[in-house]
Image (cartoon, rainbow, N blue to C red):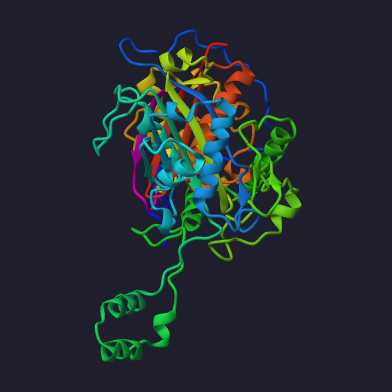
Amino acid sequence: MASMLLTSLRSSPLTSVQAAQFGRMSWVSAELTNTSPKSKKTLAKPGVKNIVLVDGVRTPFLQSGTTYADLMPHDLARAALQGLLNRTGLPKDAVDYIVYGTVIQEVKTSNVAREAALGAGFSDKTPAHTVTMACISSNQAMTTGTEHTFYDDGTVGLIAAGQCDAVVAGGVEFMSDVPIRHSRKMRKTMLSLNKAKTLGARLSLLGSIRLAHLSPELPAVAEFSTAETMGHSADRLAAAFGVSRLEQDEFALRSHTLAKKAQDGGMLSDVISFKVPGRDIVSKDNGIRPATMEQLAKLKPAFIKPHGTVTAANSSFLTDGASAVLIMSEEKALAMGYKPKAYLRDFVYVSQDPKDQLLLGPTYATPKVLEKSGLTLNDIDVFEFHEAFAGQIMANLKAMESDWFAQTYMGRKTKVGAPPMEKFNTWGGSLSLGHPFAATGCRLVTTVAHRLQKEGGQYGLVAACAAGGQGHAMVIEAYPQ
C-alpha cells in the first residue's frame, strides 16, 4: 500500500513542479576542498562547562560473518576501550563513568558496558551502563555523558552537571551471532518443565511438544509498530521523493569511492588494529568495494520485488564493530596535558511517524540544532550524515531542499536547504565503511573532528536517522590548533 506521504506528494499541487522540487541529483563527483567563509564566533556559553572530545577510536568495521564471527560483542567493545586507552595514554582510574550503546543485545552480557570495561582493565569502582536508541545509540551514550540537558526520561549529562570530569562513551554491534529464540509455545513448555516437580508432569509436558513448537523466532531489522523492514520503508521513501535507482547507485558508488580514497590516504586514523584470537590482525574495514555503475545496475531489488530501487549495493550492510571516545571537561583535559580535537556543542533528538517518515530524522533534526546553536547551514564546514540507504540520504536531501515539505510537514516557513556535496561525507559513509548499529554515532563524531582539523573548518554537523522514526543532530566545533 502506498504511503500517506507518497499519496500526499502525488495529490498535492507540488506534482506539477516535482522535477524542480525533487529533481534528479547527481552524486558522482565530490570535491575535497572547502571554500566557504569561516565563522569567527565560538559557541562557548558563559557559565557552562566546555565539553571536549579528546580522541576517538574504533575497531575495523567488518561485514558480519567474516573475521569476527567467533567473538562476542563485549570482545569488540573491550578492544575499542583498550585501543582508546593505548591511543590516549589515559590512566584507567581517571575515568569517572562509562556509557556504551548497543542494539541487538547479547543476553549473557546485557550490560555490555560493564563487562567490556572490566575486561579492558578499568577499575571495578568505575560505574558503567548501557543505552539503546537504535542507530543513534552511541550518540545517546555521548550526550548522556556530556551535556547539561534534561531529557524526557530525566537523564542529566554527567560532565556538565558536575558529577564527572572524564567519561568514556561508545557503542558495539555484533551481527554475526544474533539471539535466535525458541517459539513462544516452546519457551512456555521449557519454563514449565523447569518448574515441574514430578516425573509424570515432566513426561506430560514433553508429550505436548509438537513439531511446530520447534520453529525458531528469527530476528529481523523491522519496526515492531509497523512490522515493516527498514529496507521496505527506504524503498517507499525513495519512491515518495522520486529518487531513482540510478541516483541511488551513483551515491553508493560515490560513498565507496571516497571511502577507498580516504582509506588509502590514511584519513581513517580512528581505526585501530585488533588481533582477533586465533585469527589474523585486522587493521582496516573490509566492506569498501568500489564497483562500476554497470555492475551496480545488474543487482536485483532487495525488498520490493520486482520494481523496487533499493538493492544490496545501495544499502548499508550488516556489520560487526565497536567504537569508543574519551570526553572530558576542557579544564580536566588541559590539566592532564591533552590537546582536545573538538568541542561537543548543541544537540537535539527528534521523532516522527515511524511508518511514512521512519528515515527522515536528519531533515527534522538539522534545522532544530542549527537554531539552537545560532548557526545557519552556510556556517557549517563539515557534514557527516549516517548513510542507512542511498535512497534515505537522497530523500532527506530533497526534503531539506523543499519549501513545500518544510511548510506541509515541518511547520516551517522555508526550507533549511541541503548540505553542499563538497562538504558532505567526503571520507565515505555507512554504505561503504559499514554500519554496526550502535557504533556508528561515535564514528560520525570522530570523523567530523578529524575532517575539521584536516580541512581547517570551524563547525561540523552530525545527523542520523534511527529506527522508531527517531533522529539526532549535533554541532561540533573545532578546537583551536
Figure quadrant of the C terminus? top right
Please name whichever residue, 370 or 154, is drawn nearer the observer in this view of the structure: 154
User: What x and y, as percent, mark residue 466?
Assistant: 43, 45
Figure quadrant of the N terminus? bottom left
Check the image and name the residue furthest to the top: 40
| In this picture, residue 284 sits left or right of residue 435 | right
| In this picture, residue 197 sits left or right of residue 243 | left
| Main secondary structure type of the part rendered in magenta | strand
Residue 119 lies within the magenta run: no
Q: In which quarter of the image is residue 60?
A: top right
User: What x and y, as percent, mark residue 187?
Assistant: 34, 74
User: What x and y, as percent, mark residue 384?
Assistant: 54, 32
Q: Quadrant of residue 329?
A: top left
User: Where are the magenta residues, as a range?
Assistant: 344-356
Vertical placement of 86 versus 281: above or below?
above
Examine the rendering and report whether any part of residue 414 can be seen: no
Please name whichever residue, 442 or 334, is drawn nearer the observer in this view of the structure: 334
User: What x and y, as percent, mark residue 459?
Assistant: 50, 19
Residue 354 lies within the magenta run: yes
Tag count in the figure? 0
Q: In which quarter of the image is residue 265?
A: top right
Residue drawn at x 63%, y 16% is: 35
Residue drawn at x 24%, y 83% is: 197
| In this picture, residue 354 sits left or right of residue 151 | right
Residue drawn at x 34%, y 42% is: 351
